Image (tube, rainbow, N blue to C red):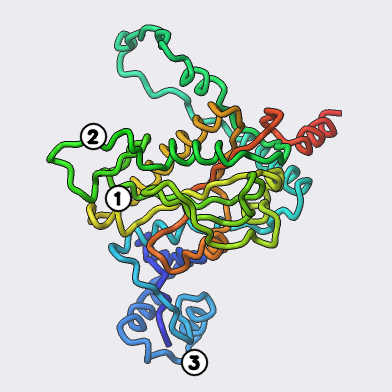
Amino acid sequence: MYINPYLFILPRSPGQIVWNYKDHTQHELDLDYSIRLTQLINNPDLFDTHSIIDTQLLSAGILTVSKIDNPQWGWDELSKIYHIGTQNIPCEHTPQNIHEWSRQYLSHCNEVLATPAPVKERQQQEAGQRIALPLPRELRDDSLVHALLQRKTCRTYTGAAMTLDDLGTLLYLSLGYLRERDGDRDDSIADDLGARRSSPSGGGLNACEGFLLVQNVDDLEPGIYAYQPTDHSISRVNSLPQSALGVLLAGQHFINNLPLGLFITARFDRLWWKYEHSRAYRMAFVEAGHLSQTFQLVATALGLNTWLTGAFADRQIEALLKLEGSAEQPLFFVGCGESDGQAMCQEMHGLLREVQA
């Protein structure tokens, strides 16, 4: 008999909460169950098939008949619990088409809106402490201002092909190591930290990377590609999945004809190389956010619309990117293409009209 390795225990008087963070299940144990679990943790061979407590612990998955593979994480247990515990959002039914997704999402939104919204502003300490800031001044080159004003999340795409030139520009300015900044160094920067992107990175580690999902780009075969920022190139990793893109992205089928998507991944081995603390895990998400926004602004400047999500099937994406058991893991998805600029898909508009009728 074995103890499930994906557990942590919370003391909650008058008992304990045993949490399986991989399967998103929890069990409350009273004193008798807590004492027995402690005995079995000390010696799993004490398992008694005639004991009701023992058999219930086994049925709950706290105990297991066979040893569960527990891959080497690389650093501390806290970040491992956070990463694995936030994977694979529990979903009773994944939408199988755009109509199911629309109904499910609308129902969820109605449930959320039925509860009071959090206070938008922080509590003021003193009414007189606020300082009015001047309005933004006009910049000599308004291309950034235009991109900032025009960037929006769109959920309707024509499926039209992107050009390879636009793809090259998009990747270089968002994920590439900028050759224009090669001279922007001093002796304090280590050789391994010399590469510079347009977005900031914790410790200059550039711990985030990118995998392309190419569905319709001129002169490029559809498939999954890894971007290599050192020499501004891509390498093919896999074919496109047989299922629609929306199946991988939590049933969001309105995105099925997106010509280009980018999975932003994090190299945790690079983070822990410099920052040997679980707080480094936060920096992976911060960096992914920077890269996502840069990607969207560049795409907007190129005349494309964008869409982004953190909802996807982790294990399927890991397999698609060939990252199973790796210290590199997917965190976020952002895509772009030609769109009519609608924030909501046509099916949702139709459903709302039916509800309002």
Q: Nearer the viewer, residue 120 or 194?
A: 194
Q: CA distance from mark 3 to mark 1?
A: 44 Å
Which residue: 40% across, 77% down? 32
**Cα distance in 3D space between marks 2 and 3:** 70 Å
Q: Secondary structure at mark 2?
A: loop
Mark 2 or mark 3, which is nearer to you?
2
What residue type is disc 3 on?
Thr
Q: Is residue 125 left or right of residue 191?
A: right
The numbered mark at residue 202 is none
Q: Residue at x 40, y 79 (%)?
A: 3
Q: Which mark is residue 280?
A: 1
Q: Counting residues from the N terminus, which is met first, the one under dot 1 or under dot 2?
A: 2
Q: Is residue 40 above or below residue 306?
A: below
- Badge 1 amino acid: Ala
Quadrant of residue 6 in the image?
Answer: bottom left
Up-down relation of residue 144 to residue 270 (above or below): above
Q: Find disc 2 in the rendering and name its residue.
A: 183
Q: Which residue is mark 3?
A: 49
Q: Amino acid at mark 2?
A: Gly
Q: Nearer the viewer, residue 150 or 113?
A: 150
Depth check: give the residue in front, 193 or 293. Answer: 193
Marks 3 and 1 close (CB-CB < 8 Å): no
